[in-house]
Amino acid sequence: MIDKILAGDVAEAARLIRDLDDRRPTALAAVKQLFPHTGKAYVVGVTGNPGAGKSTLVDALIAHYRAAGETVGVIAIDPSSPFSGGALLGDRVRMQRHALDPGVFIRSLATRGHLGGLSRSTFDVASVLDAMGYSRILIETVGVGQDEVEVMKAAHTTVVVTVPGLGDDIQAIKAGILEIADVFVVNKAERDGSDRAVAELAMMLDLSAHGEWRPPIVKTSATTGAGLPEAVAALEAHGKHLRGSPEGARRREQRARSRLLALLEARFRAAVETTAPEPDGLEEATHAIVARREDPYAAAARLFERVVSRAETVRRA
Amino acid sequence: MIDKILAGDVAEAARLIRDLDDRRPTALAAVKQLFPHTGKAYVVGVTGNPGAGKSTLVDALIAHYRAAGETVGVIAIDPSSPFSGGALLGDRVRMQRHALDPGVFIRSLATRGHLGGLSRSTFDVASVLDAMGYSRILIETVGVGQDEVEVMKAAHTTVVVTVPGLGDDIQAIKAGILEIADVFVVNKAERDGSDRAVAELAMMLDLSAHGEWRPPIVKTSATTGAGLPEAVAALEAHGKHLRGSPEGARRREQRARSRLLALLEARFRAAVETTAPEPDGLEEATHAIVARREDPYAAAARLFERVVSRAETVRRA
């Protein structure tokens, strides 16, 4: 199975990805074996508000990368909610025009919950696509809640897509995106106010502390195709910047640490959950706090010692 | 100091809150002592996009609650970024008209980072205000990233404030807010499209699974004051619903568990960090992943055992 996936077998990879989403132990073992073969793909995260045109941009990026002879893996994070609306699904259906191209492999992963956040298996699925040999991996978020922040931890380069007319205060206050964006795309540039949106972003960048790389702002129009080559060029320029710079090394380390910490925390959380039904375990500690018999700090200190002591017993056994 | 705070001493409380924000051990010890005196206040979280008018609503809620003889503590989460803009600060300055009223106590807390999230001390500060005897506590978020989700874990009742004209897809796709909102407020009702915004929310609620409580949708106008009494009534109705229902008990437990888990995870994270500079510690494990010498799963398994073993040694000592 590992050999097949390394050779780019799409059916085998699809099975593995499904099993990864179910967190099957065999699938996790496969990722471990694939891991030494990863690290070659350039991973681009595409985020921004719902409705900003992320899928349209991803669709265009696929076409441009293919024309340039690259192969492309796409991870599209799907909102698990029925309220996600037709527009987004419509765009994604359009993206499927690439599905017959053997140089393109598109997978949807459900969000971790209604409240946003990448699928738990995003990192692992990116590793699978990487090991399969796709030279470019695009991760498209839903653009809600925490997934904007999380995609930054998975991607080399993060593109924030925005549209004119979302309102000044909304644009201006979303200062967080300044720390996420390596490239800004102002989509629907045919709309009124696109120049102002660009100017506002530029002003925010002027005021902010950034390193050697100042995130470029690219205006695109999905209807005319204007600006798309410039958007691709901006992405690739950032990728090149990272390859040669200490910033690139720092980010590689940050990504590895994020993944490591997430796995450690999952282990710890599982260890806490095993105490739930036991005397003095998670349930009883929760009840003690509700009843004000114990304060949360004392309960946490006690439960932490208990979890550690039990994990150590398991380790020694 | 504890006695003074229980008696409502504002200067002493302000000092404690400042120390809590710095995570001073003496301050945490004080919260432990105050904890048995908490659980009486009704806590309302106010969230929604930046620019939706959260501060205006909070300002109006204070006035209504004071007129009804309640005392009010306010925790306003401040974006720590300089890009937060004047509008928000302006609204908050207006809120300060209540600062001379001894029945009102307003504190600002910085967000945990540019990327959103309540201040780490939000839970603790709410406990302090509760112990001081304020009958209503209002928590106003920035409305960016994870703080929408987090406020739900701190509050009894969560109000989501929105405005007409944010765009269909944005409204429709933010399905996450359906799980957060106990009450919807459509602010700036004098704007075009407010009836459509209400209708869209109502349609989303029709399609969604909710329990016995269907979140009411209230139109308000800060300029005319219309709808504000109805908004207060909706909040209070939800509070009453919780007091009598299994849902209320379930939420009390959920809040206690969230707080407990957050404290446990902070302890675990600290234990992981102590290994950072050591041989085979966090730094070396990260480097091994970057260099593909070790896969993340193997590294996490090894480091977890190490953290546990060391914590157990500390515990026994």
Image (cartoon, coloured by chain):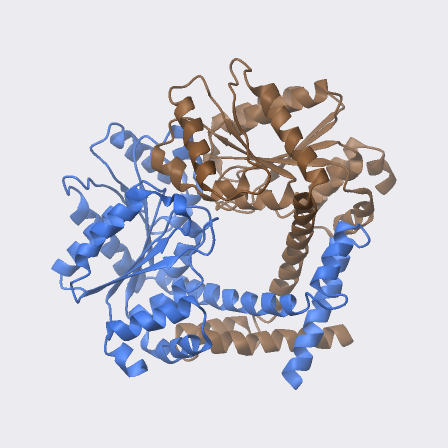
Chain colours: A blue, B brown
Vertical order, A295 against B110 (above or below):
below
Answer left or right for B4 relative to A18. Answer: right
Is residue A131 visible in this depiction of the protein? no
- Residue farthest along the bottom direction in this orientation: A317
Of the pair B129 and A314, the residue shown nearer to us? A314
Answer left or right for B5 relative to B208. Answer: right
- Residue farthest along the top direction in this orientation: B224
- Residue farthest along the left direction in this orientation: A67
Answer left or right for B287 relative to A50. Answer: right
Q: How many marks?
A: 0
Of the pair A108 and B57, the residue shown nearer to us? A108
Image point 31% across, 47% down: which residue? A215
Image point 62% across, 48% down: which residue? B120
> x, y percentage for residue B186?
48, 26
Which of the 4 image quadrants contains residue B127?
top right
> x, y percentage for residue B237?
65, 30
Which of the 4 image quadrants contains residue A164?
top left
Is residue B87 visible in this depiction of the protein? yes
- Residue farthest along the right direction in this orientation: B3
Of the pair B90 and A146, the residue shown nearer to us? A146
Which of the 4 image quadrants contains residue B99?
top right
> x, y percentage for residue A56?
23, 47
Q: Quadrant of the N terminus of chain A?
A: bottom left
Image point 51% across, 68% down: which residue? A263
